[in-house]
Image (cartoon, coloured by chain):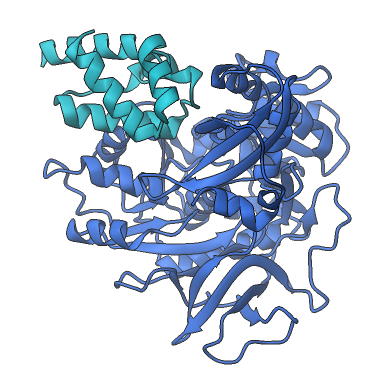
Chain colours: A cyan, B blue
Amino acid sequence: MSETRETILNMVCEQVGLDEEASKTLRSRGRLDELTAVDSLLMVDLVISLEERFGIRFEPADIDPELVGDISRLADYVDKAVRES
Amino acid sequence: MDPVITLEDLASGFAEDREVVVEHGGRRVTRNVLEAEASRLADKIAALGLPPAQRIGVLLPNSADSVASVLAVARSGHCCLPLSTGLTPDELAETVERCKVGAIVCRADQAPALSAGVKAIVVDEESPPSPETGSMTGQKLDPRRAFVCLSTSGSTGRPKFAERTARAVLANSRRVAKALGVTPADRFVAVVPFWHANGFSNCLLMPLLAGAPIVTMDRFLPRPFLDALVEHRVTVVVGSPFIYRSLLRVLDVGYDLSRVRAWISSGALLTAELDAGLRERGIRVRQLYGSSETGTLCISGERQRPPGAVGAPLPGVDIRLLKPDGSPCAAGEAGEVRVHSDAVFSGYVGSTDAVFAEDGSYKMNDRAVFEKGELRLLGRSDAMINVAGVKVDPEEVRAVIEKMAGVRRALVTGVENATGGETVKARVVADTELSAGDLLAHCRQQLAEYKLPRIIEFSDHIPEDLMGKSARRRLGD
C-alpha cells in the first residue's frame, strides 16, 4: 500500500468518524462512498485537508463524488499533484 | 394600504445597460439582456395556457438563467417554486404532485428527468422572438398574490412548502436591505442556492430590489469563492457557518478582501470559536436569524456578542417570548419565540393544519431570552437536524430507511461533527445481512444528498425509550 493511500485512509477515517469495523472495510475495499454519503460538504472538508497535508491544489473541475469516494483514485490524484507541484 | 408594486421595481435600481448578474467564470448579463431573457421565458410560460396563479418550478443552479426565470414567473402571474438540482427523481415527482406544479423551468439535460406529464420550459433552447416580448415597464404585481413557495423541513417525515405573498417577500427584502445599508454600489456574491430561503431572499431578491449586481456561483469551493470575491470586487457576502469555517481554513495573506463591507451568516449559529477565529482575521460576521416561513427577523451587529445572540428584532417585526402555558415571559425570562410580521408566510401548501396561534403569531420552535433588547437563542424545541444551514427532518430519513427490504427499524438523529455542524446519523436494526453501501444505495434513490446519513451503525435493537424526540438528540451525545 502506498504511503499516500495510507495517509489518506487515516485522514478520512478520522474526519468522517468511521468506527473500527467501517475503517477496516474502507482499508480493504477503498470505497468511501460505500460507507458514507460523499456529499458536497464532505468533499469540501476532505479537499481542504488534503490540500493542507500534501501542499497541493485540486482543480475545481476535478472535485466530484467519484474521485473523493474512491481512495485509490484519490491517492493517484494526490501523487500526481505532488509530482507536478 | 400597499404601495403599487410594479415588476420593474424588481430591478429598478439598474440602468438598462448595467450588469445585473455576473456568473463567476461565465456570462455577464445586463438589465436589457436579463429583461429580454425573462420576457422570452414568460412568453414560453404564457404559451402553455396554464390557469392563473400556478406554481412554476425553477430547477436551475444559481445563474443568470435562474434570475431571469424568477422574473419570468413573476411576470407571467404565477408563483415561483425554486427547486434544488440535487432532488432525486422521486423527490421531484412528489413535489410536483403535492404542489400541483404547472411547469418546470430547467436546462435541456434536466428535462428528461421530469416525471411524465410535467411541462418543461427549457432555458437553453432557441425560440423565435415573440411580438409580445418587451420590457416589464408598468406591469403591476399584485401584493396579495403568492410570489414564492419555499421548501422547508416538516416534522412529519415529509417536506413542507411555505408560500409567501409578493407583499411578504418584498417587505422582508426591503427591510433587510435597509438594515444592512445596501446601495447600488454594492455587489453580492450568491453561492447559497436560490432554492434555500436565505439564497432566494438575501442573494437574489434583495440585491435585485436594491440595484446591486449579483455574482452567481453554482457550487461552493473555498478557493474559487475567495477568488470570486477579489475578482468581482464583492462587497456583501451571504454565507453560513459551514462556508465561513471552510474559508477560515484556507484564508491566507494572498486575498485582498478589503472591499467586503458586510459578512452575513444564516442557517445556523456561528460558534464562539469560529466567530473568534474570523475576528482574528478581520472578518466580523453579522448573524442573521429567520426562517423560510418568516423571512429575516433579526440581524446582529458586528461587535462581539454572547453565543446565540442575534440582535434586536428588525423594524416591523414583533417577537414575543411565551411560557409553556402560553403566558408572556417576564423581562429576562426565557421562553418560546412567537412572531408577528407582514413578511410571515400565508400557510403550507396542501395543509389544513393550524400554523398560527389564536393571536395570529407564528411559532418558531426556538427558545430564547431578551438581553438588553437583543434576542439570544438558547436552543430548538424540535428534533430537526441542521446540516450546514439546511434543516433535515430525521423522520423523513427514517421512513426511507425503514422502507428498505430487510430493515426492521431505524433511528435517525443529528450528531455534532468535528467542524461544529451537525451530521445525519442512522442506527439500523436489520433482519438480513445489509451493508452500509446497500443502505446508502437505497437512500440515494429517494433522498437528496444532504439528507443522506453520514454515519451508519447497525445494531441488534433500539431501546424503546430512545424512540422519543428528545431521546433522538441523546443518541448523538
Camera-side residue: B415 or B256?
A: B415
Measured as percent of width and height from the top left, residue B456 is found at: 54, 31
* Residue drawn at the location 48% of the way across and 85% of the way down: B373
Measured as percent of width and height from the top left, residue B30 is found at: 45, 37
Camera-side residue: B324 or B209?
A: B324
Q: Is B47 drawn above or below residue B414 in the view shown?
A: above
Q: Is A13 drawn above or below residue B327 in the view shown?
A: above
Quadrant of the image for the N terminus of chain B?
bottom right
Measured as percent of width and height from the top left, residue A75 is found at: 26, 13
* Residue drawn at the location 50% of the way across and 65% of the way down: B176
Quadrant for residue B291, please give it.
Answer: bottom right
Measured as percent of width and height from the top left, residue B227 is found at: 25, 36
Q: Residue furthest front?
A: B460
Residue B411 appears anywhere in the view:
yes
Camera-side residue: B365 or B362?
A: B365
* Residue drawn at the location 52% of the way across and 74% of the way down: B314
